[in-house]
Amino acid sequence: MKSMVTTQLENGRQTEVLLADDLKDLSAHLGEYGRLVLWVFDTNTVKLFKQLPPSHVVLESGESAKNFSSLERILSSALDEGLARDGRIIGFGGGVVCDMSAFAASVYMRGCRLTLVPTTLLAMVDASLGGKAAIDFQGMKNMVGSFYPASEVLISIDTLRTLNEKEFLNGLAEVIKHALLSQDEELYKFLLMRKNEILSRDPKTLAALVELSLKVKQWYIEQDPLETLGIRQSLNLGHTFGHALESSSHYLMWGHGACVAWGTCRALEAGVVLGVTDKAYASGATKLFKSFGYDIEYRIGRGDWIEYRDHLLKDKKKVDGNVRFVLLEKQGSTILMPLDLQLIQHLVIAKPIF
Ligand SMILES: NC(=O)c1ccc[n+]([C@@H]2O[C@H](COP(=O)([O-])OP(=O)(O)OC[C@H]3O[C@@H](n4cnc5c(N)ncnc54)[C@H](O)[C@@H]3O)[C@@H](O)[C@H]2O)c1
């Protein structure tokens, strides 16, 4: 195991992200925890194991499992297995399993040990780091939750071999977003130069990509661990435009990543129109998304505007009733501001600007 990133969070809490050489290395490390552990899988990630550990819970795969009944199942199993406060929950899966395991660990006996083994690209670069843990409630995403960083995050690039293309692209959109938010251009240049190796999932290339991406997330969460200073919100770049597309199309049209890619390009355009974002930078970033196959030119039909607008206005991240968008001033520098509805309408239904 090689150390990738060590993140310092609130109250001296620390998350160490370790990279396994291969699945054998990962299993050997996990074996060291002994028997006082409860594993959490979903119906897909459980298939990655030939021999299942004795204490485990298998959740349904997908977002619909982020609910109270999954939480109750994890907590009941922990209790049945006699897990004490010094016991450990190991979440082995994508962002859903990571979020569920972290939330359960945060409330079990007022907090037990937690290790996350992210198995999607999105969970590796995003969901496993930063301590946000939540379930969906009354139809609203991540409405009930806590901050509870894992002490260890174990990454094995080998687990990505079985991930389908749509899920891979979901994670890659967040990586490209991180490249724009980074304080330096290393990740941006890596994406430009190593596109083919990334898309063909060359393991060494992916390990380097995940590490660079995690370092960007690390920077933002260390600056603003509890998301109270307006810095960590920058990580929502593209999400307000993107979520509204995702929910107004009833999650049927595209994956989350494709919507984030699309939304980030709309935010770049908004910045250009308002004189906040440099036009050449926005154009380059848009081309970068396009080069990885995201449909950036798409615009919603005129007849879909009202539904899109209604979803946009329901955005959770409102301040004084205003939805605030993340705009990019330049590489790694953002500004949060409300946008005029007419401008939004123009951007999401008009012809492309670039
Ligand atoms: N806590 C955070 O900071 C944070 C950040 C971003 C996203 N999230 C949350 O993460 C969730 C999305 O995560 P996700 O995209 O990983 O979704 P997911 O966990 O639903 O995984 C996507 C699909 O891939 C399958 N899968 C996982 N690993 C696999 C593998 N190695 N091989 C084959 N199939 C595999 C899963 O079973 C599922 O069907 C959302 O609920 C979101 O709210 C949390």
Image (cartoon, grey):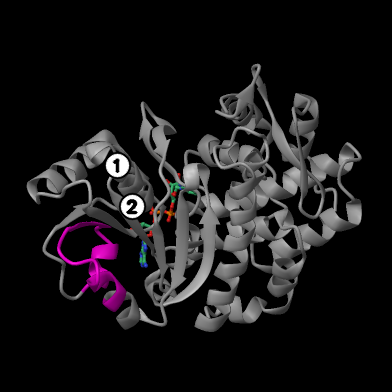
Q: Nearer the viewer, residue 292 or 127?
A: 127
- The stretch of residues the image draws in magenta is 28-49
Q: Distance between the residues labelled 1 and 2?
A: 17 Å
The quadrant holding residue 110 is: top left
Q: Earlier in the sequence, mark 1 or mark 2?
A: 2
Q: Residue furthest top?
A: 320
Q: Does the residue labelled 2 lie within 8 Å of ligand 1?
A: yes
| Circle 2: residue type | Val
Whether residue 168 is visible here, answered yes or no, is yes
**Where is residue 57 shown, x and y percent of the image?**
18, 53
User: In the figure, is residue 271 to the left or right of 164?
Assistant: right
Q: In this view, does 198 lie above or below 93?
A: below
Residue beneath the point at 66% across and 50% down: 262
Q: In this view, does 318 lie above or below 294?
A: above
Residue beneath the point at 24% across and 64% down: 46
Q: In this view, does 274 lie above or below 162?
A: above
Quadrant assignment for the N terminus: bottom left
Q: What residue would you read off at disc 1?
A: 111
Q: Nearer the viewer, residue 249 or 187?
A: 187
Q: What residue would you read off at disc 2?
A: 97
User: In the figure, is residue 329 to the left or right of 156?
Assistant: right
Q: In this view, does 50 lie above or below 115?
A: below
Q: Residues within 10 Å of mark 1 (few under 14, many from 20)?
A: some
